[in-house]
Image (cartoon, grey):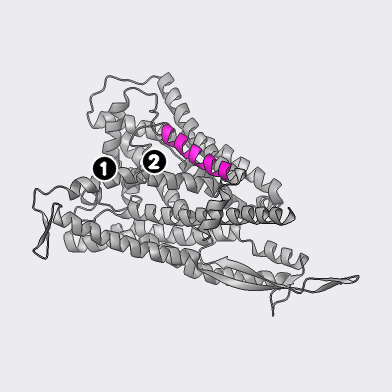
Amino acid sequence: MHFKTIFKSLKNKDMLRRVLVIFGIIIAYRFLAQIPVPMGDAGTFKEAVSNLLEKSDFSNFLNLISGGGLASFSIILVGLSPYITGSIIIQLLTKAIPSLEELSNDGETGRRKINQWTRILTIPLAIVQSVAYIFILYQSTISANIATDFTPTVGDWALSITAMTAGSLILMWMGELITEQGIGNGISTLIFASIISQLPATMASLGSALSDTSQGSLSLFGWLNLSVNPTVFWIILGFAIAMLVVIYFLVKINEAQRIITINYAKRVHGNSSYGGIKSILPIKLIAAGVIPVIFATAFLSLPALIGQVITTMNPENEFGTTLVTIFSAPSANNFASIYPDGITGQWFIYPALYFILVFMFTYFYTSIIFNTKEIADNLQKQGGFIEGVRPGIATSKYLSKVVNRLDLFGALALGIIAMLPFITDYIFIVVTGAPIGLSISGTGLLIVVTVALENLRSVDSRALMITYDDFGNELKN
């Protein structure tokens, strides 16, 4: 990374405007997270949310990616989940329907139409999820015997659902605005900001636990006493070291790429000759980035949400209970209630499904963003070729073979990284009898590191472009 170039590029008005757009939208996003849903006493529903967060790991993940919107019962409670789900559906249909696939390959016009359909599909999905969560939370207040004199009318339901749907659509608009007017992928940036916004509360909780010396203080080598909780200190130190190691390998895997040399044929036009040069085509090991992890989590969340609705309506319904059990990630919050007899075969279902979906979505999303046929056609038009490979169809097959091999290792690496929290939980279950509950933290760490690297790379590329133009202008003057 060229950090000096990045700082120098901030003198450019366009670059500075893009950076300010990102920070401005993130600040506005955090304000939205504090606006409560207009339905009765917000404090009552916050208590219901607390009960829900203790029972559902998916609710914890939704709270994480919404920047605490669920815990604060804000209008962005639903978050970006409808837009992500809509994107998955549209992209699956694009691969299944030839006319849609042809439209997606029809340049910018086709992509705009598909993006517009994704936005339209987001609206009914946001409405359905808003209805489901309001219903679940209201029924939770009743089943938990939380004191409330509020009985929602049809108007209250309509107002709250409209507010939550509008909040989801505003987030979608903010994400697209960052993509167009800012730097990097806007949806990923908002999810990144949501996770980062939870760090102060996490640090405060760790600090409180660390300063609790009621069970004694830490003594180092018998001559240095620290007024900290010794158990918490060593746990935090161990996880900090483990996190640094994981981040190191995440960065290495995310930056790994295969370089393919492209040769351009020499052309003679009159007395001038063109071409005869070499270029490179870098192919990343994990070209899909963090999108497969987000897609897999969103995909697995729908059955859990349906199960919660069913069990809220009828707590004795076995089908709803089964859905919640199978599609809820094993965690410290739900382990004792769902697995009272310890680890059973059912414990491995969610991690296995998660791994399979991450693996599949890595292949799927890479095929969308890296179209080998289109790249081969463009190379042929520009007179480019890979040494030892014929232009056209042969080049497309060669690139597909290379990408599939990279995807195999990339998908396995991404799946194993996504599995690390479950592996840690399994070890703690065997040793202590209960998981430590790092599933969501691991997913959040994976998203934060990957998005940070992608955005930093985007900033670096734009900074190089801007400073290059400025250098050219200086030479002209």
Please name the predominant secondary structure of the magenta segment in the image: helix
Q: How many numbered circles does the render carry?
A: 2
Q: Which residue is mark 2?
A: 67
Please tell me which residue lies in front, 224 or 310: 224
Residue 319 can be seen in this image: no
Question: Does residue 23 belong to the magenta stretch?
Answer: yes
Q: Which residues are magenta?
A: 16-32
Residue in the picture at 48% in, 70% down: 409
Please tell me which residue lies in front, 99 or 315: 99
Q: As drawn, which residue projects farthest toward the front?
A: 477
Residue in the picture at 27% in, 29% down: 141
* 387 vs 167: above or below: below
Q: Which mark is residue 405?
A: none
Callout 1: SS? helix
Name the N-terminal-most of marks 2 and 1: 1
Residue in the picture at 55% in, 48% down: 10
Q: Which mark is residue 54?
A: 1
Q: Picture coordinates of residue 176 (x, y %)?
A: 56, 42
Work out how far the residue at label 2 is from the one at label 1, CA to CA, in angstroms. 17 Å
Give neighbour class at mark 1: few <14, some 14-19, many 20+ (Cα, 10 Å): few
Q: Picture coordinates of residue 39 (x, y %)?
A: 37, 24
409 horizontally vs 199: left or right: right
337 horizontally vs 254: left or right: left
Question: Does residue 50 belong to the magenta stretch?
Answer: no
Q: As drawn, which residue projects farthest toward the bottom?
A: 388
Q: Picture coordinates of residue 178 (x, y %)?
A: 55, 43
Callout 2: SS? loop
